[in-house]
Amino acid sequence: MEKEESLKLAIAVSLIQSKIHNRTSSPHETDALRWRHKAKERKREIIRLQEDLKDAETNASCKCYFFDNLGEFSGRRFGEEASEPNRFNHVLRRRFLRLARTRGRRKSTLPSQRLGVSGTGYEEEAENLKISIDFLMELAETDSNASSFSNWSHQAVDFMLASLKKLISMGRSLEAVEESISCMITQLTNRMCTPFKGNEVKQLDVGFYAQHLIRKLGCDSYIGQRATFAVSQRISILAENLLVMDPFDESFPEIDECMFILMQLIEFLICDYLLPWAESESFETVLFEEWIASVVHARKAVAALEERNGLYLLYMDRVTGELAKRVGQLTSFREVEPAILYKILAYSE
């Protein structure tokens, strides 16, 4: 009987001591346990992501399709391709930006030139866009193996389009990035007309890959309309050069091929994106009228070459026909200068 009483007393004392101990130490121990639990969950999530990315790299179904339909019409708009799962996007974007920043720092010699960003969200996003443009231009100008060029250019394009979309959504002027975007379009256009020296990025003409990069970037109205304007002007310049060039000149075949690549690019941009551009809030009507006039002028310049190569004129007639068809649809919800519309319809007949 005494043993049972002493046992009950001991249990009671033990419970009281346990409660007192929990009251005095529970906050600290609870915090420690909570952070330890979060650390374990974080570690497990990292391990899962690493395994998923490893499977994605080794699985044939996760092949990069960025350069599929090279130089061909696709059955769907370029903005409609299936995207990577959201959990991959954040990881890949961070990895790409880290690599692009690292390369940028290597090229910087002065502390003020370094690409560390601190400031408003607009300034940071604008700087990220410039970094990705520089990265893509460096990638296009250097020797790279097929897999590296395809994967990194894919991520650079996706990153640029995402950054530009954020900047437009902020409702601020894009003057901070306009020069960089214009320089990018000019360099890629030059790349289409310049044969690659040394070890080629691909075993095919690099001009088509530069064309495809502009075609992908052109899904955004801000880049696409500027690209169409720049390319149509380049066609006019080349047509004038061909008019006085000796057909037996060594550079003639390269310029001839470049003409068709440029005309094909304008056709792709118009057919793929003109109506989506017009539906976007960032659509610039003044620029739209300018590049339409430039395309019409390019058609005039090409007409002068009809006796030397009638295919140029046939192709540009097809381009202006597609343009007239889509502008006719566009007038139902956008105002178009009557004089511009008349010129298009006149040349498309």
Image (cartoon, rainbow, N blue to C red):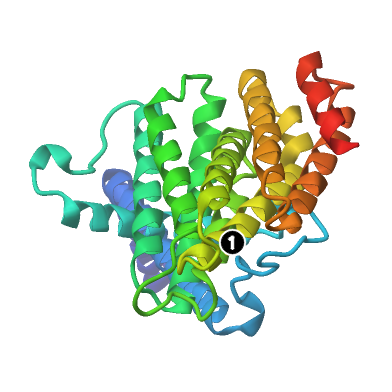
Q: How many marks?
A: 1
The answer to whether residue 114 is above or below residue 309 is: above
Residue at 75%, 49% in the rendered image: 313
Look at the numbered disc 1 and give the secondary structure of its residue: helix
The answer to whether residue 109 is above or below residue 345 is: below
The reply to whether residue 119 is in sight is yes
State left or right for residue 142 relative to residue 214. Answer: left
Residue at 18%, 54% in the rendered image: 107
**Quadrant location of the C terminus in the rendered image:** top right
Residue flagged by tag 1: what amino acid is it?
Asp
State left or right for residue 122 relative to residue 241. Answer: left
Hey, which quadrant is residue 186 in on the image? Answer: top left
Hey, which quadrant is residue 47 in on the image? Answer: bottom left
The reply to whether residue 336 is in sight is no
Residue 132 is situated, as x and y percent measured from the top left of the image, at 39, 49
Viewer-proximal residue among 22 and 288: 288
* Residue holding disc 1: 256
Residue 64 is situated, as x and y percent measured from the top left of the image, at 59, 71
Task: Rate crowding at label 1 as few (under 14), some (14 to 19) or many (20 or more) other CA atoms within 10 Å.
Answer: some
**Quadrant location of the N terminus in the rendered image:** bottom left
Residue located farthest toward the left when viewing the structure as drawn:
110
Residue 187 is situated, as x and y percent measured from the top left of the image, at 42, 49
The answer to whether residue 103 is above or below residue 79 is: below
Residue at 60%, 55% in the rendered image: 259
Residue 157 is situated, as x and y percent measured from the top left of the image, at 51, 53
